[in-house]
Amino acid sequence: MNMHADVLFVNAHILSMDKRVPFATALAVRNGRILAMGRDDDLANLKGPHTQVIDVRGRSLLPGFTDSHIHLVAWALQRQRVDLWGVRSLTEALARVQAHAKKTPGKEWVRGGGWDASLWPDLDGQWPTAAHLDAVVPDRPVVLDSKDLHSLWVNSRALRLAGITAQTPDPPGGVIVRDPRTGEPTGILKETARDLVFRLMPPETEETWVRALREGLPALWAEGITAVHVLNDTPTMRNFRVLQRLRETGDLKLRALLYLPAARLDDAIRLGLRSGFGDDRLRIGGVKFFADGTLGSRTAAMLAPFLDDEENTGVWVTDPEELYESVRRASEAGLAVAVHAIGDRANREVMNIFQHIGEEHPERPRPALPHRIEHVQLLHPDDVARVAQLGLVASMQPIHATQDMELARASWGETRSRFAYAWRSVQRAGARLVFGSDAPVEQPSVLAGLHAALTRRRDDGTPGEDGWIPQERMCLRPALHAYTLAPAIVEGSAAWRGSLHPGKVADLIVLSDNLVSVTWEDPMRILDMHVVMTMFNGEIVYTSEE
Protein backbone atom coordinates (compact mmCIF):
# COMPACT_ATOMS: atom_id res chain seq x y z
CA MET A 1 0.00 0.00 0.00
CA ASN A 2 1.26 3.48 -0.91
CA MET A 3 1.92 5.34 2.34
CA HIS A 4 3.79 8.25 0.86
CA ALA A 5 3.17 11.62 2.48
CA ASP A 6 1.36 14.45 0.74
CA VAL A 7 3.64 16.93 2.53
CA LEU A 8 6.87 16.22 4.39
CA PHE A 9 8.40 18.84 6.69
CA VAL A 10 12.10 18.33 7.42
CA ASN A 11 14.87 20.11 9.32
CA ALA A 12 12.31 21.56 11.72
CA HIS A 13 12.40 22.51 15.38
CA ILE A 14 9.12 20.88 16.31
CA LEU A 15 7.24 22.01 19.42
CA SER A 16 4.64 19.25 19.46
CA MET A 17 2.93 20.26 22.75
CA ASP A 18 2.50 16.50 23.18
CA LYS A 19 4.52 14.65 25.85
CA ARG A 20 4.41 11.50 23.71
CA VAL A 21 6.58 13.22 21.09
CA PRO A 22 9.29 15.02 23.09
CA PHE A 23 11.60 15.50 20.11
CA ALA A 24 11.18 15.51 16.34
CA THR A 25 12.62 17.28 13.32
CA ALA A 26 10.34 15.84 10.63
CA LEU A 27 6.58 15.60 10.23
CA ALA A 28 4.58 13.88 7.48
CA VAL A 29 1.05 14.83 6.45
CA ARG A 30 -1.37 12.65 4.51
CA ASN A 31 -5.08 13.17 3.78
CA GLY A 32 -5.30 16.10 6.20
CA ARG A 33 -3.84 14.18 9.13
CA ILE A 34 -0.41 13.81 10.67
CA LEU A 35 0.94 10.56 9.30
CA ALA A 36 4.19 10.33 11.25
CA MET A 37 6.73 12.29 13.27
CA GLY A 38 10.38 11.65 14.05
CA ARG A 39 13.88 12.49 12.85
CA ASP A 40 14.52 13.38 9.23
CA ASP A 41 16.13 10.00 8.50
CA ASP A 42 13.27 8.13 10.15
CA LEU A 43 10.70 9.62 7.77
CA ALA A 44 12.76 9.60 4.57
CA ASN A 45 10.91 6.53 3.29
CA LEU A 46 7.63 8.49 3.30
CA LYS A 47 8.84 10.71 0.48
CA GLY A 48 7.22 9.72 -2.81
CA PRO A 49 7.30 11.11 -6.35
CA HIS A 50 4.45 13.53 -5.57
CA THR A 51 5.39 14.45 -2.00
CA GLN A 52 5.91 18.14 -1.35
CA VAL A 53 9.04 18.44 0.77
CA ILE A 54 9.38 21.60 2.86
CA ASP A 55 12.72 22.46 4.46
CA VAL A 56 11.87 24.37 7.64
CA ARG A 57 15.52 25.41 8.05
CA GLY A 58 15.64 24.92 11.81
CA ARG A 59 12.72 27.22 12.53
CA SER A 60 9.86 26.34 14.87
CA LEU A 61 6.96 24.20 13.69
CA LEU A 62 4.09 23.92 16.15
CA PRO A 63 0.33 23.35 16.38
CA GLY A 64 -1.97 25.99 14.94
CA PHE A 65 -2.94 28.61 17.49
CA THR A 66 -6.39 28.96 19.05
CA ASP A 67 -7.70 32.42 19.90
CA SER A 68 -9.91 31.50 22.84
CA HIS A 69 -11.76 34.80 23.04
CA ILE A 70 -12.65 36.64 19.86
CA HIS A 71 -15.68 38.53 18.56
CA LEU A 72 -15.29 37.12 15.09
CA VAL A 73 -17.67 38.96 12.78
CA ALA A 74 -17.30 42.20 14.76
CA TRP A 75 -13.54 41.94 14.20
CA ALA A 76 -14.04 41.24 10.48
CA LEU A 77 -16.42 44.20 10.09
CA GLN A 78 -14.15 46.52 12.05
CA ARG A 79 -11.40 45.92 9.50
CA GLN A 80 -13.63 47.67 6.95
CA ARG A 81 -14.64 50.68 9.07
CA VAL A 82 -12.98 53.65 10.77
CA ASP A 83 -10.03 52.06 12.49
CA LEU A 84 -9.04 53.94 15.66
CA TRP A 85 -7.00 51.14 17.23
CA GLY A 86 -3.70 52.47 18.55
CA VAL A 87 -4.50 56.09 17.60
CA ARG A 88 -2.47 58.32 19.92
CA SER A 89 -4.47 61.57 19.97
CA LEU A 90 -7.94 63.03 19.60
CA THR A 91 -6.70 65.08 16.65
CA GLU A 92 -5.59 61.97 14.79
CA ALA A 93 -8.85 60.18 15.61
CA LEU A 94 -10.97 63.03 14.24
CA ALA A 95 -8.85 63.18 11.10
CA ARG A 96 -9.50 59.49 10.47
CA VAL A 97 -13.23 59.91 11.05
CA GLN A 98 -13.39 62.84 8.65
CA ALA A 99 -11.38 61.00 5.98
CA HIS A 100 -13.60 57.94 6.22
CA ALA A 101 -16.76 60.07 6.02
CA LYS A 102 -15.54 61.64 2.79
CA LYS A 103 -15.21 58.16 1.28
CA THR A 104 -18.61 56.99 2.56
CA PRO A 105 -21.40 57.69 0.08
CA GLY A 106 -24.45 59.84 0.73
CA LYS A 107 -25.76 60.08 4.25
CA GLU A 108 -24.64 56.65 5.41
CA TRP A 109 -23.83 56.25 9.07
CA VAL A 110 -20.14 56.56 9.85
CA ARG A 111 -19.16 53.53 11.90
CA GLY A 112 -15.93 52.37 13.44
CA GLY A 113 -14.15 51.81 16.69
CA GLY A 114 -11.03 50.88 18.59
CA TRP A 115 -10.55 54.22 20.35
CA ASP A 116 -8.89 54.47 23.75
CA ALA A 117 -9.16 57.98 25.16
CA SER A 118 -6.65 57.18 27.91
CA LEU A 119 -3.96 57.36 25.20
CA TRP A 120 -4.94 60.87 24.07
CA PRO A 121 -2.91 63.61 25.81
CA ASP A 122 -4.91 66.35 24.08
CA LEU A 123 -7.97 65.26 26.11
CA ASP A 124 -6.11 65.58 29.44
CA GLY A 125 -7.83 62.54 30.95
CA GLN A 126 -11.34 63.55 29.85
CA TRP A 127 -13.80 61.68 27.63
CA PRO A 128 -14.30 62.74 23.99
CA THR A 129 -17.63 64.38 23.24
CA ALA A 130 -20.29 64.68 20.58
CA ALA A 131 -19.08 68.24 19.92
CA HIS A 132 -15.70 66.90 18.87
CA LEU A 133 -17.34 64.70 16.24
CA ASP A 134 -19.77 67.45 15.19
CA ALA A 135 -16.79 69.53 14.12
CA VAL A 136 -15.81 66.99 11.45
CA VAL A 137 -19.10 65.20 10.62
CA PRO A 138 -22.15 67.30 11.57
CA ASP A 139 -24.66 66.09 8.99
CA ARG A 140 -25.03 62.35 9.62
CA PRO A 141 -24.73 59.93 12.54
CA VAL A 142 -21.28 58.91 13.74
CA VAL A 143 -21.10 55.83 15.98
CA LEU A 144 -17.71 54.66 17.30
CA ASP A 145 -17.14 51.72 19.63
CA SER A 146 -14.49 52.07 22.31
CA LYS A 147 -11.61 49.62 22.25
CA ASP A 148 -13.22 47.55 25.01
CA LEU A 149 -16.62 47.53 23.21
CA HIS A 150 -18.35 48.77 26.36
CA SER A 151 -18.64 52.49 25.52
CA LEU A 152 -19.96 54.28 22.47
CA TRP A 153 -18.86 57.70 21.23
CA VAL A 154 -21.53 59.37 19.08
CA ASN A 155 -22.15 62.77 17.57
CA SER A 156 -25.13 65.07 18.16
CA ARG A 157 -26.93 63.79 15.09
CA ALA A 158 -26.95 60.26 16.55
CA LEU A 159 -28.12 61.55 19.94
CA ARG A 160 -31.03 63.44 18.32
CA LEU A 161 -32.10 60.44 16.27
CA ALA A 162 -32.11 58.30 19.41
CA GLY A 163 -34.06 60.94 21.34
CA ILE A 164 -31.42 61.08 24.07
CA THR A 165 -31.75 64.29 26.08
CA ALA A 166 -31.07 65.52 29.61
CA GLN A 167 -34.43 63.99 30.60
CA THR A 168 -33.62 60.50 29.29
CA PRO A 169 -33.09 58.15 32.25
CA ASP A 170 -30.16 55.76 32.39
CA PRO A 171 -31.37 52.32 31.27
CA PRO A 172 -30.85 49.39 33.65
CA GLY A 173 -27.20 48.31 33.43
CA GLY A 174 -26.22 51.40 31.45
CA VAL A 175 -24.92 54.94 31.82
CA ILE A 176 -25.56 58.05 29.73
CA VAL A 177 -22.57 60.27 30.50
CA ARG A 178 -23.79 63.81 31.17
CA ASP A 179 -22.34 67.29 31.53
CA PRO A 180 -22.19 67.87 35.31
CA ARG A 181 -23.34 71.48 34.89
CA THR A 182 -26.26 71.10 32.48
CA GLY A 183 -27.18 67.42 32.64
CA GLU A 184 -27.03 67.21 28.85
CA PRO A 185 -25.65 64.00 27.31
CA THR A 186 -22.01 64.40 26.30
CA GLY A 187 -21.92 61.80 23.54
CA ILE A 188 -20.60 58.84 25.56
CA LEU A 189 -22.96 55.92 26.17
CA LYS A 190 -21.85 53.05 28.40
CA GLU A 191 -22.96 49.42 28.55
CA THR A 192 -26.71 48.94 27.84
CA ALA A 193 -27.14 52.66 27.08
CA ARG A 194 -25.45 51.91 23.75
CA ASP A 195 -28.58 50.03 22.71
CA LEU A 196 -30.46 53.35 22.52
CA VAL A 197 -28.43 54.05 19.38
CA PHE A 198 -27.74 50.50 18.20
CA ARG A 199 -31.45 49.81 17.70
CA LEU A 200 -31.70 52.67 15.20
CA MET A 201 -28.75 51.71 13.04
CA PRO A 202 -29.50 50.60 9.49
CA PRO A 203 -29.63 46.81 9.35
CA GLU A 204 -26.72 45.02 7.77
CA THR A 205 -27.26 42.17 5.39
CA GLU A 206 -26.06 38.66 5.98
CA GLU A 207 -24.09 38.97 2.77
CA THR A 208 -22.15 41.88 4.27
CA TRP A 209 -21.20 39.74 7.26
CA VAL A 210 -20.23 36.74 5.14
CA ARG A 211 -18.09 38.85 2.82
CA ALA A 212 -16.33 40.52 5.74
CA LEU A 213 -15.38 37.23 7.40
CA ARG A 214 -14.38 35.58 4.14
CA GLU A 215 -12.03 38.48 3.49
CA GLY A 216 -10.79 38.40 7.09
CA LEU A 217 -9.84 34.72 7.28
CA PRO A 218 -6.41 35.19 5.60
CA ALA A 219 -5.54 37.75 8.28
CA LEU A 220 -6.19 35.11 10.95
CA TRP A 221 -4.12 32.53 9.08
CA ALA A 222 -1.31 35.10 8.87
CA GLU A 223 -1.30 35.10 12.68
CA GLY A 224 -1.18 31.30 12.76
CA ILE A 225 -4.76 31.04 14.03
CA THR A 226 -6.55 27.87 12.94
CA ALA A 227 -9.25 27.78 15.64
CA VAL A 228 -11.30 30.29 17.59
CA HIS A 229 -13.69 30.46 20.51
CA VAL A 230 -16.35 33.01 19.58
CA LEU A 231 -17.49 34.95 22.68
CA ASN A 232 -20.31 35.81 22.14
CA ASP A 233 -22.98 36.19 19.45
CA THR A 234 -25.55 38.90 18.76
CA PRO A 235 -29.27 38.35 19.41
CA THR A 236 -29.62 37.89 15.64
CA MET A 237 -27.03 35.07 15.80
CA ARG A 238 -24.79 36.89 13.35
CA ASN A 239 -21.71 34.77 13.94
CA PHE A 240 -23.62 31.48 13.85
CA ARG A 241 -25.28 32.42 10.56
CA VAL A 242 -22.01 33.42 8.93
CA LEU A 243 -20.08 30.40 10.16
CA GLN A 244 -22.80 28.08 8.88
CA ARG A 245 -22.77 29.79 5.49
CA LEU A 246 -19.01 29.45 5.13
CA ARG A 247 -19.16 25.84 6.30
CA GLU A 248 -21.79 25.03 3.67
CA THR A 249 -19.67 26.49 0.88
CA GLY A 250 -16.46 24.84 2.08
CA ASP A 251 -14.85 28.19 2.95
CA LEU A 252 -14.74 27.68 6.72
CA LYS A 253 -11.07 26.82 7.00
CA LEU A 254 -11.17 27.55 10.69
CA ARG A 255 -12.46 25.59 13.68
CA ALA A 256 -14.99 27.55 15.72
CA LEU A 257 -16.51 26.99 19.15
CA LEU A 258 -19.46 29.36 19.45
CA TYR A 259 -21.07 30.77 22.59
CA LEU A 260 -24.69 31.85 22.27
CA PRO A 261 -25.86 35.20 23.66
CA ALA A 262 -27.80 35.35 26.92
CA ALA A 263 -30.80 36.63 24.95
CA ARG A 264 -31.04 33.21 23.27
CA LEU A 265 -30.90 31.09 26.43
CA ASP A 266 -34.61 30.26 26.40
CA ASP A 267 -34.48 29.36 22.69
CA ALA A 268 -31.47 27.11 23.22
CA ILE A 269 -33.17 25.31 26.10
CA ARG A 270 -36.38 24.83 24.10
CA LEU A 271 -34.40 23.42 21.18
CA GLY A 272 -32.49 21.09 23.47
CA LEU A 273 -29.09 22.40 22.37
CA ARG A 274 -26.22 21.14 24.48
CA SER A 275 -22.57 22.11 24.76
CA GLY A 276 -20.36 20.19 22.34
CA PHE A 277 -22.97 19.76 19.61
CA GLY A 278 -21.55 20.13 16.11
CA ASP A 279 -18.68 18.83 14.02
CA ASP A 280 -14.95 19.45 13.56
CA ARG A 281 -15.54 22.91 12.03
CA LEU A 282 -18.39 24.39 14.06
CA ARG A 283 -19.58 23.45 17.55
CA ILE A 284 -21.74 24.93 20.31
CA GLY A 285 -19.71 25.96 23.34
CA GLY A 286 -22.46 27.23 25.60
CA VAL A 287 -24.00 30.57 26.59
CA LYS A 288 -22.24 33.88 27.32
CA PHE A 289 -23.29 36.25 30.10
CA PHE A 290 -21.96 39.59 31.30
CA ALA A 291 -21.53 40.28 35.01
CA ASP A 292 -20.02 43.75 34.79
CA GLY A 293 -18.41 46.26 32.43
CA THR A 294 -14.74 47.10 31.90
CA LEU A 295 -11.79 48.94 33.37
CA GLY A 296 -11.54 51.37 30.45
CA SER A 297 -15.18 52.42 30.75
CA ARG A 298 -14.95 52.52 34.58
CA THR A 299 -17.86 50.05 34.73
CA ALA A 300 -16.04 47.02 36.20
CA ALA A 301 -17.76 45.91 39.42
CA MET A 302 -15.39 46.66 42.29
CA LEU A 303 -15.12 45.73 45.98
CA ALA A 304 -13.82 49.28 46.57
CA PRO A 305 -14.21 52.41 44.43
CA PHE A 306 -11.89 53.32 41.58
CA LEU A 307 -9.04 55.42 42.92
CA ASP A 308 -9.58 58.04 40.22
CA ASP A 309 -13.40 57.97 40.54
CA GLU A 310 -14.08 57.71 44.25
CA GLU A 311 -17.87 57.50 44.05
CA ASN A 312 -17.82 54.74 41.47
CA THR A 313 -17.79 50.99 42.18
CA GLY A 314 -18.80 49.98 38.68
CA VAL A 315 -21.91 48.63 36.97
CA TRP A 316 -23.72 45.31 37.19
CA VAL A 317 -24.61 44.59 33.58
CA THR A 318 -26.62 41.62 34.82
CA ASP A 319 -28.09 41.68 38.32
CA PRO A 320 -26.39 38.94 40.41
CA GLU A 321 -29.68 37.26 41.30
CA GLU A 322 -30.73 37.22 37.67
CA LEU A 323 -27.30 35.92 36.68
CA TYR A 324 -27.55 33.14 39.26
CA GLU A 325 -30.90 31.99 37.91
CA SER A 326 -29.71 32.08 34.29
CA VAL A 327 -26.51 30.15 35.03
CA ARG A 328 -28.49 27.54 36.97
CA ARG A 329 -30.98 27.05 34.14
CA ALA A 330 -28.29 26.84 31.49
CA SER A 331 -26.20 24.36 33.45
CA GLU A 332 -29.17 22.12 34.18
CA ALA A 333 -29.99 22.13 30.46
CA GLY A 334 -26.51 20.90 29.56
CA LEU A 335 -25.17 24.26 28.43
CA ALA A 336 -21.81 25.43 29.72
CA VAL A 337 -21.64 29.06 30.77
CA ALA A 338 -19.01 31.70 30.02
CA VAL A 339 -19.29 34.81 32.20
CA HIS A 340 -17.55 38.11 31.49
CA ALA A 341 -16.07 39.37 34.76
CA ILE A 342 -13.49 42.17 35.07
CA GLY A 343 -13.60 43.70 38.56
CA ASP A 344 -12.65 41.89 41.77
CA ARG A 345 -16.24 42.07 43.01
CA ALA A 346 -17.61 40.70 39.74
CA ASN A 347 -15.16 37.78 39.78
CA ARG A 348 -16.00 37.00 43.42
CA GLU A 349 -19.72 37.12 42.80
CA VAL A 350 -19.47 34.93 39.70
CA MET A 351 -17.45 32.34 41.61
CA ASN A 352 -20.01 32.48 44.43
CA ILE A 353 -22.73 31.73 41.90
CA PHE A 354 -20.89 28.71 40.50
CA GLN A 355 -20.14 27.49 44.03
CA HIS A 356 -23.75 27.78 45.18
CA ILE A 357 -25.07 26.00 42.12
CA GLY A 358 -22.59 23.16 42.60
CA GLU A 359 -23.37 22.80 46.31
CA GLU A 360 -27.16 22.95 45.91
CA HIS A 361 -27.43 20.05 43.50
CA PRO A 362 -24.16 18.09 43.48
CA GLU A 363 -25.94 15.02 42.11
CA ARG A 364 -27.02 16.70 38.88
CA PRO A 365 -24.90 16.07 35.77
CA ARG A 366 -22.81 18.94 34.49
CA PRO A 367 -22.53 20.13 30.89
CA ALA A 368 -20.11 18.25 28.65
CA LEU A 369 -17.83 21.31 28.55
CA PRO A 370 -16.59 23.23 31.61
CA HIS A 371 -17.89 26.57 32.79
CA ARG A 372 -15.50 29.48 32.32
CA ILE A 373 -14.86 33.06 33.40
CA GLU A 374 -13.87 35.45 30.64
CA HIS A 375 -11.05 37.91 31.44
CA VAL A 376 -10.59 37.24 35.20
CA GLN A 377 -8.92 40.63 35.07
CA LEU A 378 -8.72 41.54 38.76
CA LEU A 379 -8.88 39.13 41.68
CA HIS A 380 -8.89 39.65 45.41
CA PRO A 381 -6.06 37.55 46.95
CA ASP A 382 -8.65 35.36 48.70
CA ASP A 383 -10.17 34.37 45.35
CA VAL A 384 -7.08 33.38 43.34
CA ALA A 385 -7.26 29.69 44.23
CA ARG A 386 -11.04 29.46 43.88
CA VAL A 387 -10.95 29.40 40.08
CA ALA A 388 -9.25 26.00 40.21
CA GLN A 389 -11.17 24.76 43.26
CA LEU A 390 -14.45 25.31 41.42
CA GLY A 391 -13.23 23.60 38.25
CA LEU A 392 -13.60 26.76 36.17
CA VAL A 393 -11.65 27.71 33.07
CA ALA A 394 -9.78 31.01 33.27
CA SER A 395 -10.07 32.56 29.81
CA MET A 396 -7.59 35.45 29.78
CA GLN A 397 -5.97 37.84 27.32
CA PRO A 398 -2.27 38.62 27.93
CA ILE A 399 -2.20 41.69 25.70
CA HIS A 400 -4.73 43.40 27.99
CA ALA A 401 -2.14 43.63 30.77
CA THR A 402 0.43 45.55 28.77
CA GLN A 403 -2.18 47.78 27.16
CA ASP A 404 -4.01 48.51 30.43
CA MET A 405 -1.20 48.72 32.98
CA GLU A 406 -1.13 52.51 33.31
CA LEU A 407 -4.91 52.65 33.55
CA ALA A 408 -4.91 49.85 36.12
CA ARG A 409 -2.34 51.66 38.23
CA ALA A 410 -4.40 54.85 38.19
CA SER A 411 -7.75 53.14 38.79
CA TRP A 412 -6.85 50.24 41.08
CA GLY A 413 -3.49 51.20 42.56
CA GLU A 414 -0.41 49.05 43.07
CA THR A 415 -1.77 47.00 45.99
CA ARG A 416 -4.96 45.85 44.29
CA SER A 417 -3.17 45.41 40.96
CA ARG A 418 -0.88 42.73 42.41
CA PHE A 419 -3.47 40.17 41.27
CA ALA A 420 -4.48 41.96 38.08
CA TYR A 421 -4.06 39.78 34.98
CA ALA A 422 -2.60 37.15 37.32
CA TRP A 423 -2.13 34.34 34.81
CA ARG A 424 0.77 32.66 36.56
CA SER A 425 -0.92 32.65 39.96
CA VAL A 426 -4.13 31.28 38.48
CA GLN A 427 -2.26 28.61 36.55
CA ARG A 428 -0.08 27.62 39.52
CA ALA A 429 -3.23 27.24 41.62
CA GLY A 430 -4.29 24.52 39.17
CA ALA A 431 -6.86 26.29 37.01
CA ARG A 432 -7.26 25.48 33.33
CA LEU A 433 -5.93 28.53 31.51
CA VAL A 434 -6.67 29.51 27.92
CA PHE A 435 -5.48 32.62 26.11
CA GLY A 436 -7.11 34.85 23.49
CA SER A 437 -7.07 38.37 22.12
CA ASP A 438 -10.59 39.75 22.63
CA ALA A 439 -10.38 41.08 19.06
CA PRO A 440 -11.44 43.62 17.93
CA VAL A 441 -10.63 45.02 21.39
CA GLU A 442 -7.02 44.09 20.61
CA GLN A 443 -5.42 42.75 17.47
CA PRO A 444 -5.56 38.94 17.11
CA SER A 445 -1.78 38.49 17.26
CA VAL A 446 -0.76 35.40 19.21
CA LEU A 447 2.93 36.30 19.03
CA ALA A 448 2.11 39.67 20.64
CA GLY A 449 0.13 37.79 23.27
CA LEU A 450 3.02 35.42 23.93
CA HIS A 451 5.36 38.38 24.27
CA ALA A 452 3.02 40.03 26.78
CA ALA A 453 2.63 36.80 28.77
CA LEU A 454 6.37 36.22 28.99
CA THR A 455 7.56 39.81 29.53
CA ARG A 456 4.61 41.92 30.73
CA ARG A 457 6.23 44.73 28.73
CA ARG A 458 5.04 46.88 25.87
CA ASP A 459 6.78 46.86 22.51
CA ASP A 460 8.87 49.87 23.57
CA GLY A 461 10.12 48.01 26.66
CA THR A 462 7.88 49.84 29.12
CA PRO A 463 7.92 49.59 32.13
CA GLY A 464 11.42 48.11 32.24
CA GLU A 465 13.34 44.86 32.10
CA ASP A 466 11.38 43.08 34.84
CA GLY A 467 8.00 43.98 33.40
CA TRP A 468 4.82 45.01 35.20
CA ILE A 469 4.16 42.76 38.22
CA PRO A 470 6.99 40.38 37.27
CA GLN A 471 5.65 37.66 39.58
CA GLU A 472 2.98 37.01 36.94
CA ARG A 473 5.35 36.53 33.99
CA MET A 474 4.89 33.12 32.40
CA CYS A 475 7.35 30.62 30.98
CA LEU A 476 7.16 29.70 27.31
CA ARG A 477 5.70 26.20 27.54
CA PRO A 478 2.70 27.06 29.77
CA ALA A 479 1.96 30.13 27.64
CA LEU A 480 2.08 28.09 24.42
CA HIS A 481 -0.10 25.45 26.08
CA ALA A 482 -2.74 28.14 26.72
CA TYR A 483 -2.80 28.93 22.98
CA THR A 484 -2.71 25.33 21.67
CA LEU A 485 -3.57 22.20 23.63
CA ALA A 486 -5.44 23.81 26.54
CA PRO A 487 -8.22 25.25 24.32
CA ALA A 488 -8.63 21.84 22.69
CA ILE A 489 -8.91 20.20 26.10
CA VAL A 490 -11.48 22.78 27.20
CA GLU A 491 -13.61 22.21 24.11
CA GLY A 492 -13.34 18.42 24.32
CA SER A 493 -11.36 18.01 21.08
CA ALA A 494 -7.89 17.20 22.41
CA ALA A 495 -8.10 13.64 21.05
CA TRP A 496 -7.81 14.96 17.51
CA ARG A 497 -6.35 18.48 17.64
CA GLY A 498 -4.36 20.94 19.76
CA SER A 499 -1.01 19.18 19.61
CA LEU A 500 1.11 17.42 17.00
CA HIS A 501 0.84 13.63 17.08
CA PRO A 502 0.22 10.95 14.44
CA GLY A 503 -3.50 10.68 13.76
CA LYS A 504 -4.35 14.25 14.73
CA VAL A 505 -5.48 16.82 12.17
CA ALA A 506 -2.71 18.65 10.38
CA ASP A 507 -3.38 22.13 11.73
CA LEU A 508 0.10 23.57 12.12
CA ILE A 509 2.27 26.62 11.60
CA VAL A 510 5.88 27.52 10.85
CA LEU A 511 7.45 30.56 12.48
CA SER A 512 10.18 32.80 11.09
CA ASP A 513 12.71 31.73 13.74
CA ASN A 514 13.38 29.22 16.48
CA LEU A 515 10.98 30.33 19.19
CA VAL A 516 12.82 28.61 22.03
CA SER A 517 16.17 30.15 21.09
CA VAL A 518 14.66 33.61 20.66
CA THR A 519 12.89 33.39 24.02
CA TRP A 520 16.05 32.23 25.76
CA GLU A 521 18.19 34.99 24.25
CA ASP A 522 15.75 37.89 24.51
CA PRO A 523 11.96 37.44 24.72
CA MET A 524 11.48 41.00 23.43
CA ARG A 525 12.55 39.60 20.05
CA ILE A 526 9.34 37.56 19.86
CA LEU A 527 7.80 40.74 18.45
CA ASP A 528 10.23 40.53 15.52
CA MET A 529 8.95 37.08 14.58
CA HIS A 530 6.07 36.26 12.28
CA VAL A 531 4.22 33.29 10.85
CA VAL A 532 5.67 32.11 7.52
CA MET A 533 3.24 29.25 6.87
CA THR A 534 -0.14 28.06 8.14
CA MET A 535 -1.61 24.66 7.32
CA PHE A 536 -5.24 23.84 8.02
CA ASN A 537 -6.48 20.28 7.73
CA GLY A 538 -3.47 19.40 5.60
CA GLU A 539 -3.90 22.35 3.22
CA ILE A 540 -1.40 25.21 3.15
CA VAL A 541 -3.72 28.20 3.45
CA TYR A 542 -1.10 30.89 4.07
CA THR A 543 2.52 31.57 3.21
CA SER A 544 4.49 34.78 3.56
CA GLU A 545 7.24 36.09 1.34
CA GLU A 546 10.56 36.46 3.14
Image: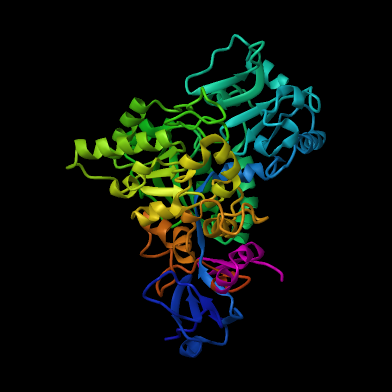
Residue 231 magenta-highlighted: no
- Residues 514 and 67: in front is 514
248, above or below 150, in the image? below
Residue 353 picture quarter: top left
Q: Residue at x 47, y 54 (%)?
A: 472
- The quarter of the rendered structure image containing the C terminus is bottom right
- Res. 375 in view: yes
Q: Is residue 161 visible?
A: no
Asked if 69 appears above or below 161 in the picture, the reply is below
What x and y, as percent, mark residue 332? Answer: 26, 38
Residue 330 horizontal/vertical position (percent): 32, 36
**Which quadrant of the structure image shows residue 372?**
top left
**Residue 438 image position (x, y, % from top left):** 54, 46
- Residue in front for this viewpoint, 437 or 352: 352
Answer above or below: position of 421 versus 517.
Answer: above
Name the image colouring. Answer: rainbow
Q: Nearer the viewer, residue 489 or 86?
A: 86
Q: Which residues are magenta?
A: 517-546
Q: How many marks can you see?
A: 0
Indicate yes or no whether the magenta region holds residue 535: yes
Q: Residue at x 56, y 40 (%)?
A: 409
Residue 29 x, y percent position in the rendering: 49, 76
Question: In this image, 540 relative to 375: left or right?
Answer: right
Residue furthest to the front in view is 415
**Quadrant (top left/top right/bottom left/bottom right) for the N terminus:** bottom left
Q: Which residue appears farthest toward the left when viewing the image? A: 363
Residue drawn at x 59%, y 39% is 407
